[in-house]
Amino acid sequence: MPRGPIFSVATQQVREPGGYVARRDIVQHPGSVVILAVDEAQARPRVLLERQYRHAAKSFLWELPAGKIDPGETELTAAKRELLEETGYAAARWSLALRFYVSPGFLDESMAVFWARGLRKGDAMPEEDEFITTRLVPLLQALRMATHGVIRDAKTIASILWLERKLRT
C-alpha cells in the first residue's frame, strides 16, 4: 500500500452497522491543527489569513494557518509552532474552538481548530517549499470572501463561520 512522509493507506475488512462486511481503504494521517488567529486590537476583529499555492487545487488559496502534528507534539504545541513558522505571529491566549474530520469517508485525519488571541508579530520561518503571503482581514470581509467563493478552503470557511457565530452570541 502507498506510504509517504505524511500519510499511509491501509486496507481493512469492516463489519458495517447493518452487518454488511466490506473492504475499506483508509488514508491514515497523524492529524492536523488549524489556527484561527484573531487580532482584537482594533474596534472590529481581524482574522489572519495566508495565501499560498496548493498543487492539488492547482491554485493559490486563502487559508488559515495550519499544519500536521509532529510525533511527540500535543495539538496546542503544534498550533503554536505552525502559527510562528508560517506567519511570524505568536499569541498570548489559546482555546480549542472546533474539532472535525476532514473527509471521513476514506481519511481518518482529525483537525483541531485553535482560537488564538493577543497576537504579537515576529519573523516567519516558513519551510523551504512554502511561499506564504499573510494578511489581517476584517472578520466581515473574511465572511464575505467565504460566502462568495473567494475562500474555497473548507477548514477556513468552517472556522470563520464559527468565529462569526461565537462573537455574535
Image: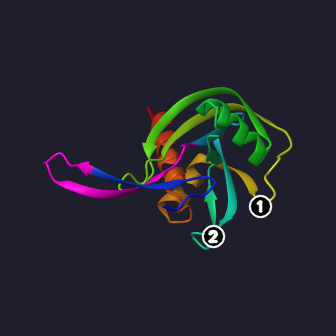
**Helix, strand or loop under label 1:** loop
Residue appearing at x 33%, y 57% in the figure: 24
* Residue 129, label in figure: 1
Is residue 11 visible to us here? yes
Q: Nearer the viewer, residue 90 or 70?
A: 70
Q: Nearer the viewer, residue 14 or 128?
A: 14
* Residue 55, label in figure: 2
Q: Is residue 6 left or right of residue 102?
A: right
Up/down of 137 relative to 168, above or below: below
Q: Amino acid at mark 1?
A: Asp
Residue appearing at x 67%, y 31% in the figure: 77
Residue occupying the far bottom of the picture? 58
Q: Nearer the viewer, residue 164 or 155?
A: 155
Q: Looking at the picture, how far across and down is residue 31, in whole percent? A: 53, 43
* Region in magenta: 14-32
Q: Nearer the viewer, residue 101 or 36?
A: 101
Queried whether the magenta region covers residue 15, the answer comes back as: yes
Q: Is residue 77 left or right of residue 25?
A: right
Up/down of 74 relative to 20, above or below: above
